[in-house]
Amino acid sequence: MTDVAQAQPKQHLELLKVLGPAHIWALGVGIVLVGEFMGWNFAVGKGGALGALIACWVIGLLYTCVAMIDSEITSTVAAAGGQYTQAKHMIGPLMAFNVGLYLVLAYTMLEAADVQVAGQLIQIGAQNFGFAIPWQPFTILVLAILAFINYRGVFMTLTINFVITAAAFVTIIILLIGTQPWNPGAVLLHKELLTGLPYGWIGVLASLHFGIWYYLGIEGTCQAAEEVRSPGRALPMGTMLGIITLLIAAALTWYVCCGLLPWQYLGWDDELAPLYDAARMLGSPFFTTLLFIGTLLSATASANGCINDASRAWFSMARDVYLPTWFGAVHPRYRTPFRSIVFLIPIAAIFALFIPLAQVITFSILSGLLNYTFMPINMFKFRRMWPLGTIKRGFEHPFHPLPAIVLFVLCSVTFFAVYLGYGRQLLAMMAFYIVASCWFAFHRYRYVKRGNQFTMPWPRPIGY
């Protein structure tokens, strides 16, 4: 009897396939929408109000290319890990390892920024009622609650994200209506407040750095590829609707804030919540309370989605033995990568408590940029190795290779923009990734079984 029991294979637990297009939209937009409530305004400090608007549309083009490429590849390579899994199939282990780290750090740093903002907002709200309390305990409380929700299951996590993300987006629409855009000059004072380009075109270039904050994280929809019921339908629909939503939200945010607040105030380093401050300019308790709630909801939704995405990337790398396999466990009841979720929470807490917001945002931006720079290479290899018609794709994005070329050019320009303001941080991040690559190449790679990583039932690629 014992021999029979030992001969039976161990049960292999997998992530549950329970998500639909609405959940993918909630994941992508939920992570990013906080960028409309805070962070983007640092671009105003770099290039003025008009410079930030130019950055909004230029970076919007960058992320439209990201969404198109991701929609095709991830709906075809439908596995957790997103861009990490793409790199594993198209390029190789070292590139995949680095992309996995880019993803984990981008989402973990964004998560840290979100909970830092949430804690400080709660502190501001308490002060309005006469209570002088520190923000740090609230930051930890928000992080702990969201970690628990993610631990209990992805369906509940992203259903909650859908509700609070939609509510936060509606607050932007209501604020727009409150400013009477149909009556120029009555409330919105663009004619008086817009002052051209105070730092010239070099300021516009520098503003690309924080223009990324309007959209950073939309690529996170790929992390749910293994947990959707129909990848070919849900991933492209959720991702493309998500980038459309964000383009609208970014334009409305710029329009309202730059019509109510001077650009010098918007671009101030200590300006935490521009939409909330814009609402305060209306002098209405209703709008002030509404945008306070909207800002808090957007930060919470973003942190919630980031915990989901960072843990999936870390889990995928561990499952492929790129990291210790202990992190690749799936909870037997909730079917979540629970060890990866719990492990990354203290890292986010440390950055949220001890690192200034602008620097945490820059850590996230740099890691995201490195990921986007790899994507054009991946797209070219994907189309060359498996041309159209050789495998079934969930979605075929048009105009190839134009989106890949545009994405690479815009990423290169944005790297220079980041270097203008945060050159040492950029170099430090590059040094970190070089050291991590050496660790993987000389230590961890010997544990990797290359053949086990190709999980897609595809024909042999062209040229191999």
Image (cartoon, helix red, strand yellow):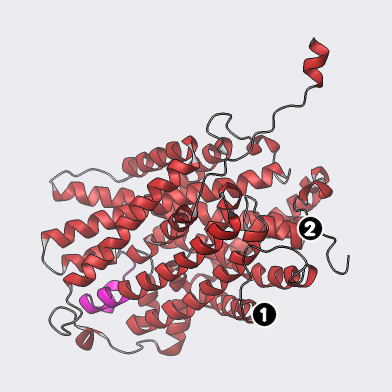
Which quadrant of the figure has residue 67?
A: bottom right
- Discs 2/1, front: 2
Q: Is residue 407 visible?
A: yes
Foreground pick, 253 / 102 = 253
Vertical position of residue 428 compared to residue 416: above or below? above
Kindly state the secondary structure of the residue where label 2 is placed: loop
Looking at the picture, how far across and down is residue 264, in whole percent? 28, 77
Residue that label 2 marks = 458
Q: Residue at x 70, y 68 (%)?
A: 378
Residue 386's label in the rendered image is none
- Alpha carbon of mark 2 to alpha carbon of mark 1: how far? 23 Å
Residue that label 1 marks = 401
Vertical position of residue 31 compared to residue 370: above or below? above
Looking at the picture, how far across and down is residue 233, in whole percent? 56, 59
The verdict on residue 266 being magenta is yes
Q: Reading the chain from its start, which is encountered first: label 2 or label 1?
A: 1
Q: Residue furthest right?
A: 464
Asked whether, in this view, residue 398 is left or right of residue 283, the answer is: right
Foreground pick, 132 / 290 = 290
Q: Residue furthest top?
A: 1
Q: Residue at x 59, y 65 (%)?
A: 71
Q: Residue at x 32, y 48 (%)?
A: 119
Which quadrant of the figure has residue 52?
A: bottom left
Q: Residues within 10 Å of mark 1 (few under 14, many from 20)?
A: few
User: What amino acid type should be assigned to the residue bearing mark 1?
Assistant: Pro
Q: Residues within 10 Å of mark 2 (few under 14, many from 20)?
A: few
Residues rendered magenta in the picture:
254-269
Looking at the picture, how far across and down is residue 322, in whole percent? 72, 46
